[in-house]
Amino acid sequence: MTATAHESALDQGGLAPAYAAARTRLGLIALLLTLAGVGWWWTAREMQDMDGGPWTELGTVTWFLAVWVVMMAAMMFPSVAPTVALYSKLKHTRALGAPLVFASGYLLVWGAVGLLAYALARSGGQLFGDVLAWDSAGRWVAGATLLVAAVYELTPLKDVCLGKCRTPLGFLLGSWRDGLSGAMQMGARHGAWCVGCCWALMASLFALGVMSVVWMALVTGLIAFEKLIPSRRVATYGTAALLLVLGVLMLVAPDGIPTLTIPGGGSMSSMNEMSR
């Protein structure tokens, strides 16, 4: 058996218990997907006409944090739902309390990441002024961010974190805690591994337009692609290739990126049409 085939077999084995649990916890899966759907609807409504392209203004901390948490539920619940179902099955209960607390702990970690991102954006603006403006260094920083994200996809740390997400049975058994407080702790720990896996993709979302539903959907698809398809190697190399292409285009030909909003001027294609 080749190394690639061996890795694929291990990944399928790692995901199989979660998929099996999902088939026995359809009500829980449906609830999480419904919450994700509501999150998509609410986020799209809140972000309507707010896409300012790379490094979009984030608004007030209260508004941003509310939108961010709902956005994370919309983006992450579909891919984490099998793990929550597996947790419910291992706990030998069909009650929704503990699994939802587990999901809340997971979401709490991503909420903290959003708060950190907001603090960095605000402090960076105070220290460096308008350096992220498109006509300053914004375009180049956005391109560099996408290239760094592409490289991170191929690092050992990414591989370790993704492995924890793709083999949830081992993670759950190795970090089991009883009670609702235990559910919160386990959800938070799983969320921390997910942050290690996906932080670069989230940074890419800021570089492309954090208030864009289109880019939000793309990043959501990449996260699900990495966590749920059989081959980990195909997932990481495919994602890295896409980020690499987007990074190069951002640096040399941003008008070649579909739906990209150029700060201060709408999409690049719209600007070109207006200049003719």
Image (cartoon, rainbow, N blue to C red):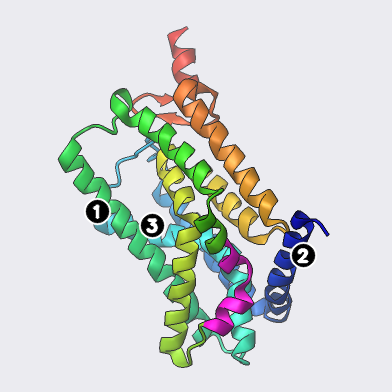
Q: Neighbour class for label 1 at 10 Å: few (<14), some, many (≥20)?
A: few
Q: Give the residue number, with chain letter if any, for mark 1.
A: 119
Q: Is residue 85 visible?
A: no
Q: Is residue 34 left or right of residue 229?
A: left
In the picture, measured across the screen, residue 200 lies left or right of residue 9, that is: left
Q: Quadrant of residue 263?
A: top left
Give the residue pinned by disc 3: 68
Q: Which residue is mark 2?
A: 9
Q: Nearer the viewer, mark 2 or mark 1?
A: 2
Q: Quadrant of the N terminus?
A: bottom right
The relative height of residue 13 versus residue 86 in the rendered view (above or below) is above
What SS does tag 2 mark? helix
Q: How busy is the neighbourhood of tag 2: few (under 14 within 10 Å), some, or many (20 plus)? A: some
Q: Residue furthest right?
A: 1
Residue 71 position within the rendered picture, expressed as x and y whole percent measured from the top left = 45, 57
Dominant SS type (magenta): helix
Q: Which residues are magenta?
A: 162-174
Q: Indicate yes or no whether the magenta region holds residue 172.
A: yes
